[in-house]
């Protein structure tokens, strides 16, 4: 099931992967994958990353339609997109964390030049991480 114990809420996650390395469960070639409680993507699309070029990634979750979407915008203006209907209220616990990670085999290097998070969710409680 992709290394997640489905009997506990501890391991619940939604991930967006930009995968350059093909594992046995991956599709052929470089791909963007949406992962729901598993490292085996529920949806994938191929993309063409150009070595050394900057890309802009935009990730949007639209709550009314329960749709997670991502777009990769390349320096040459081309765009790769992926989207999937996911009801985050049923997939994730009430409190979540946002994480970024990267892994390389031998020669890749990943740099995050900037990132931001915007939400229009109104809450009465606030939580600030000590990270």
Image (tube, rainbow, N blue to C red):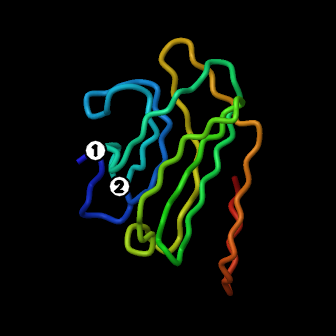
Q: CA–CA distance between discs 1 and 2?
A: 8 Å
In front: 125, or 42? 42
Q: Residue at x 46, y 50 (%)?
A: 15
Residue lying at the far right in this picture: please name it: 114
Is 111 left or right of 10, judged from the image as shown? Answer: right
Q: Is residue 66 left or right of residue 129?
A: left
**Badge 1: few (under 14), some or many (20 or more) residues near its Cα, within 10 Å?**
few
Residue 22 placed where, x, y %? 35, 25
Residue 29, above or below 17: above
User: In the rendered structure, which disc, 1 or 2, sits on the residue that comes first in sequence?
Assistant: 1
Q: Is residue 93 above or below residue 34?
A: below
In the picture, residue 97 is in which quadrant?
bottom right
- Per the image, the residue denoted by label 2 is 37
Residue sitting at x 62%, y 21%: 109
Q: Residue at x 33, y 27 (%)?
A: 28
Residue 47, x across and y down, in percent: 49, 32
Q: Please rate how many residues cluster around mark 2, counting C-alpha atoms within 10 Å: few if below 14, some from 14 to 19, many from 20.
A: many
Whole-percent x and y of residue 3? 29, 45
Local secondary structure at mark 2:
loop
- Look at 26% across and 28% down and name the residue there: 24
Q: Kindly identify which numbered label has been placed on residue 35.
A: none
Instruction: Count numbered badges in the picture.
Output: 2
| Callout 1: SS | loop
Tags 1 and 2 touching, CB below 8 Å: yes
Depth check: 85 or 116 in front?
85
Give how far across and how far down residue 69 sits, in percent.
53, 56
Which residue is outermost to the bottom? 124
Residue situated in front as seen by the camera: 109 or 33 = 33
Question: On the image, numbered disc 1 is attached to which residue?
Answer: 2
């Amino acid at each position: 099931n992709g290394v997640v114990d489905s009997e506990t809420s501890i391991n619940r996650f939604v991930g967006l992967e930009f995968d350059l390395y093909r594992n046995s469960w991956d599709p052929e070639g470089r791909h963007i994958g949406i992962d729901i409680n598993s490292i085996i993507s529920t949806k994938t699309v191929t993309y063409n990353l150009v070595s050394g070029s900057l890309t802009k990634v935009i990730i949007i979750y639209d709550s009314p339609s329960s749709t997670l979407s991502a777009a990769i915008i390349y320096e040459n203006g081309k765009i790769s997109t992926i989207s999937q209907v996911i009801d985050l209220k049923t997939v994730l616990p009430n409190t979540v964390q946002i994480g970024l990670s990267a892994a390389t085999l031998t020669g890749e290097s990943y740099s995050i030049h900037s990132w931001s998070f915007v939400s229009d969710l109104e809450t009465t409680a606030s939580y600030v991480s000590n990270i």
